[in-house]
Image: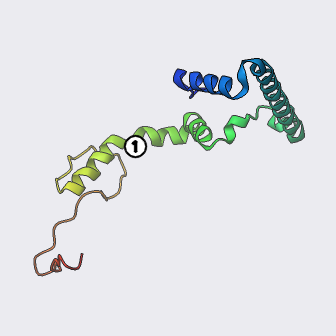
Amino acid sequence: MFNDIGALELVTIVVLAILVFGPDKLPKVVQDVAGFVRKIRAFSDSAKQDIRSELGPDFKDFEFEDLNPKTFIRKQLSTNEDLSDIRSSFDLRQELNDVTDAVNGRDPEPAPAPAGSGPDLVKKPAAPSSEQRTPFDADAT
């Protein structure tokens, strides 16, 4: 729950709690907060159980973490065989290098093309002749 709180933040919260509530009332406040957190967790667990029972036996292995888009995509990429074939044939680093070379005006290094691949859309086209170029106007930009 508090995975992203460091030691300094925790010490700051404790010092502020002591200053705001005082050392006499602090144990009672901590008990109240802990009880509130327990009630929220119990409510959440009972809501999850109700949803699972309403969905029926078809969704008995349903996980609520799958509703997170990142988790869903990660799970689909790791289990789906068609997507894993696509993922293994795609080299993101090579694609980024090709785009960088095209933007900088360098010829990209020829990479081995997979079978059945189409035209290279990243390759920079030949420069137009001088009569085809529009004049550059520094004042217009």
Q: Is residue 13 above or below residue 110?
A: above
The scheme the figure's colours follow is rainbow
Is 23 situated left or right of 82 in this image?
A: right
Q: Secondary structure at mark 1?
A: loop
Total marks placed: 1
Q: Quadrant of residue 60?
A: top right
Q: Is residue 70 above or below residue 61?
A: below
Q: Quadrant of residue 27?
A: top right
Q: Give 86 or 66, whichever is nearer the viewer.
A: 66
Q: Quadrant of the C terminus?
A: bottom left
Is 9 situated left or right of 28 in this image?
A: left
Q: Is residue 9 at least partly visible in the picture?
A: yes
Q: Give 122 or 120, whichever is nearer the viewer.
A: 122
Q: Quadrant of residue 62?
A: top right
Amino acid type shown at disc 1: Phe
Q: Is residue 113 at least partly visible in the picture?
A: no
* Residue at image location 73% in from the left, 26% down from the top: 21
Is 107 situated left or right of 46 in this image?
A: left
Residue topped by disc 1: 90
Is 105 situated left or right of 61 in this image?
A: left
